[in-house]
Amino acid sequence: MPNYDAIVIGTGQSGPALTRRLVAAGWKVAVIERKLFGGTCVNTGCTPTKTLVASAYAAHLARRAADYGVTIGGGINVDMRAVKVRKDAVVAASRDGLERSLKTLEGCTVYEGHGRFAGPKQVQVGNEILAADKIFLNVGARAVVPPIPGLDRTPYLTNSTMMDVDFLPPHLVVLGGSYIGLEFAQMYRRFGSEVTVIELGPRLISREDEDVSQTIADILGQEGIAIRVNSKVVEVAKQGEKVAVTIESEGGRSQVVGSHMLLAIGRRPNTDDLGLDKAGITTSKQGYIEVDDQLRTSVPGIWALGDCNGRGAFTHTSWNDYEIVASNILDNGSRRVSDRITAYALYIDPPLGRAGMTAAEVRKSGRPALVGTRPMERVSRAVEKGETKGFMRILVDQETKQILGASLLGLAGDEVIHCILDVMYAKAPYTVLQQAMHIHPTVSELVPTMLGELVPLE
């Protein structure tokens, strides 16, 4: 039985980085990967989807060339095979580089296969049983496949299988009006597909403020994406070469018929077949591994990082998980999950950058607050670039003067949000940012301007 100082199961964002830190500290580490090195982000998430978004943006901008005084003759054609080849090349460079680095890392032994617990300190891979006093789980998550009548007899796509698509779906029906679904919806509409989004809730991305949801719906609608909210999918069926989706809305039933169907209604952790019961590891009803504020599981010496712990569903939260664990184990740190501020982005065009609380959450808290808002039409950089859709909003605690949150839906919102986020982490008053001199012309220069025009939040 090979003995190690640590076993790392999974090579998403947390696993490889933690492995390097442990090896640098003199630990002997075993890394187990059952499929693709790099996990969701590299293979079926951030890296490939943002590469596809870039191709879709290029097609969209080319169609708008006349708006900038540029004439393109012969029409705009999208070669989906070439789009996929580009995406695959970007993914392969990242995945192959990671795999190579781990396999050549001194002090690290890579096992390719499915790892399952054989006991609290033992993990089986194939016919081998590995042992270690410390075990780190970074096994990720996958798309939810809901129990919709007829789904077992109807072809469908997920964010993973979408990566194999090298053709243009004539009509893509997206089940789910949240972050993943909306990115694919706009992307394929810009490639040239007809797109319909079906959402069970009363509005898109329901965790955001209502005006943010509505503005996003307007942006997508202006591009020709059909949006059906308050719509429950009651049945799906194959209809010849097409897919028929029956929905129930406002007491009546109707049908949306498309060529392809994408499931984008949530994620579930990859914890089903890890043998967690043999290790005594506690999970939630949804299958997430329960962890404390320092990412320790119910079993001493075992940690869970990344999507599988339910404490964040992003690459950056997984990376932060690694930083917390590495600091606490190797640097005698006391970092905690509760120290981090909620932050993420929606990568439609224009993007939504988010940090901290929404306006609805601030109102619910009952604290006196101030708000600053600016439409992108009043941002010089956006006007100059011809990209004026959306708006920016920032929220401030009236008493402490600390920034509570921000929603930046507009040009470069996913980048600008960080100047706000950094001040929030510093726990500095908003006046620090308000009085900063930003560069003109940028989107960021309007953040101090917004902070100089605060009004009470109603």
Image (spheres, rainbow, N blue to C red):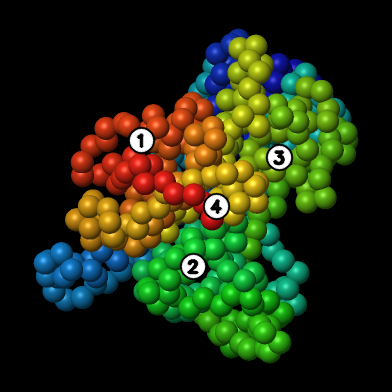
Query: What residue would you read off at disc 3?
Result: 309
SS under mark 2: helix
Image quarter hosting the N terminus: top right
Alpha-carbon span between mark 1 and mark 4: 20 Å
Q: Which comes before the other along the chain, label 3 or label 4? A: 3
Residue position for label 1 = 434
**Residue at disc 1, secondary structure:** helix
- Residue 40 lies, in percent from the top left, at 56, 46
Mark 3 surroundings: few (<14), some (14-19) or many (≥20) residues within 10 A: many
Q: Which residue is drawn at 23% across and 69% down?
A: 64
Which residue in the protein does label 2 denote? 214
| Residue at x 21%, y 44% (from the top left corner) | 441
Q: What residue type is labelled 4?
A: Ala
Residue 298 shown left or right of residue 330 in the figure: right
> Relative to 126, does residue 81 appear above or below in the rendering?
below
Q: What residue type is labelled 2?
A: Gln
Return the x and y of residue 455 as percentages of the image width and height.
44, 49
> How far is mark 3 from mark 4, CA to CA?
28 Å
Spatial separation of the CA atoms under disc 2 and disc 1: 29 Å
